[in-house]
Amino acid sequence: MRLLLFALRRVAWLAPTLLGVVALTFAISHVIPADPAALLAGEMASPEQIARVRAEHGLDQPASVQFVRYLGRIARGDLGRSLYTTRDISFDLVRRLPATLELTLAAMVVTVVLGIPIGVLSALRRNSLLDHAVRGATIAGLAIAAFWMGIMLQLLFAMTLGWTPLGGRLTGFPPRTITHLYVLDALLTGDWSALGSALNHLALPALTLGIPAMATVVRFTRAGVLDVINSPYVLYQRAMGVPASVVVWKYVLRNAAISTITQLGLVFGVLLAGSVVVETVFDWPGLGLWAVNSIVMSDYNAIMAFTLWVAVVYIAINFLVDVLHLLVDPRESAA
Amino acid sequence: MAQQQRRRSGSYALERYDPAVGFTAVRFKDHFLGWGHNQSPIERIDFRSVRETTSVVLGLIKGDFHGTDGFLPADQIDRLRKSENVRIVEQETMRIFTIQLNNQRAPMSDVHVRRAISYAFDYDGFNNGVLKGTVVRNPVPLPNNMWGVPKGVKGYTYDIDQAKAELAKASVKIDRPLRLHIVAGNAQSEQAATVMKAGLEKIGITVQIVPEPWPTLTGRAQKVETTPDMWTLWVSTLYADPNNWIGESYNSKYWGTWKSSSWYKNERVDDLLERALRSRDQAERAKAYEEASKIVVDDAASVFIYNTKEYGPFNKRVKGVRFCPVGSGQEVRWMSFE
């Protein structure tokens, strides 16, 4: 019941939050000194042609009228047309989302599979050489700029060792796709060559995205475990002769995981919103690269759609993390 | 659009297109010109749009890419020259680089101020120092290698004393910083602006460099009020005729377009350019363009800096590359792959 009430309260706040984001984005995009009608009409268009295009698309209307029309279109799921490609923006978004999703999931695998165990180990061996090394490495992982790390990984693994490609998502065009997640599609269709190519292309961008995320998770997991490890009930379990591995992985981690879960959720949201830098460095055809292209081309409609997407992702992820918190920690729901 | 309209006039046909990735094209065997000239033509081309310069350069060095456009920075061209996989096809093209001056706004409305600005740019320092001699000095509003270029016009040189002398003759006072807009993310644009700023500050004019995306800049150029004081501009070959450069840039009937963003007006020049456009006699047209060019240079309508040399990086296995200045492109039908 408490969970339901919480959920309803949060959903009620969703609409005004999104409205605020849309209004702010709309205002900013119309303050920038560039003419979307000129973009649509093309570089060689005469002033008369540009004026005609402006009228056709309602760009000569007052900003308030344009905003109301825009809200109406959003409510119908119409994100408008790209000023640069003239395609439906929904088409571009849907086309590019699987690439970002696949990269995000791969980065999350790196983050979770490596981050949590390393964090636990570091906490259990507190102040050892391993712990110091891990702490130093995580600071480096958080401090190093993503684009620099990506380029360094390219130089090492792609150029020097020749183990991976430089960028892109696959060699050539994709074979038969079901979900548009190439790794999953390759598994489902039994296309082992495509599977190898997809994993090979995924390796470097996933590492580049995953390393800073993993660093965050390691630090939070370590802190959480340290917080719990000396609790009386843990000491009791150990005194009763419960194996250390059971104590750690069943009891300690469960209680220490609360902050880690929060971080994982937030990290997922950040990654899913489109990792602009990593996708640009690795020429990964996801939402991040699409956003960069849109900004460079002053494609207002696409920029607003991307901003809306980011806002929706963050709001949704925060909501889910809060719900998960309630489920994992009974004290929160009692409160 | 490429998928909707099949015209069959090109030597390669679109095979597959993914807006997020790029497209592939296959050789059109029934092309009207035939394929007898090329014993081993390229059967399939995979075009990819790669935003990051480093990725393009590394891809060429590694051999993943076999060619790219000719807009790489000079230091990356040098880097590619050292690669055993890459050769650079070098050719003077027809793409001039200028700094446009808003002739309708004070202080640039004064010809002496414009001449002072023209004398304050370090052409040799920029062309041979910053760009390492990868471009050719072009002092006129037409590419050097185009017909219609006046012979013997040396244009402006870097001369601070001369710049100060011109400024002293100006009837307007310069009491504000001049805004020099550049193409955001374009290193050369920024470098040129820095050189211009350094020169102008030596004659007491302060400059504020403002990066903006290309679409923003072209949008501004529609109106004289929104056109920047100065901005960096390349004029490429959309069609190989002098009107592409001097006509569309300095004939006042083109006002409101990005090429004509100097907002220059001279009735004699307008008359010459209109006559040249209407005439079918190339010798007569050439004379008109030569005279118009001299006037435009004398009026210092813009700062004329260089003509581009195209450095097309190609994999060494790609043979038969023929450069075409129109669109800075290469016709693939002559190419083969060893």
Image (cartoon, rainbow, N blue to C red):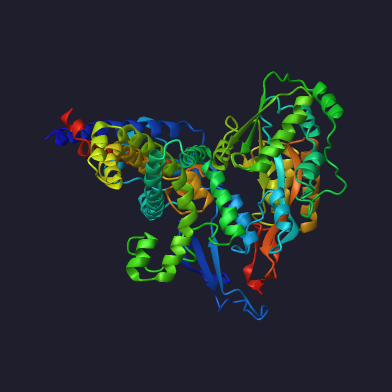
In the image, taking residue A177 as reference, residue B208 lies left or right, namely right
Residue B281 placement (x, y as % from top left): 76, 58
- Is B172 positioned to the left or the right of A260 in the image? right
**Residue A27 occupies quadrant:** top left
Up/down of B19 relative to A33, above or below: below
Report which quarter residue A219 is drawn in: top left
The residue nearer to you, when weighing A261 against B119, is A261
Q: Which quadrant does the C terminus of chain B fall into? A: bottom right
Q: Residue furthest right?
A: B152
- In the displayed structure, A287 sits above or below B162; it is below
Nearest the eye: A183 or B231: A183
Residue A48 spot, x, y in % from top left: 51, 42
Count of labels shown?
0
From the top left corner, tell me how far across and down residue A117 is, in percent: 37, 46
Can you name the residue that lies furthest to the left here? A1
> How far from the left and from the top, in percent, is residue B333?
63, 72
Residue drawn at 21 percent across, 31 percent down: A332
Q: Is residue B323 left or right of residue A119?
A: right
Tell me if residue B115 can be seen: yes
| Front residue of A87 and B280 | A87
Residue A292 visible: no
Q: Residue at x 79, y 29 (%)?
A: B116
Residue at screen point 46% across, 48% down: A290
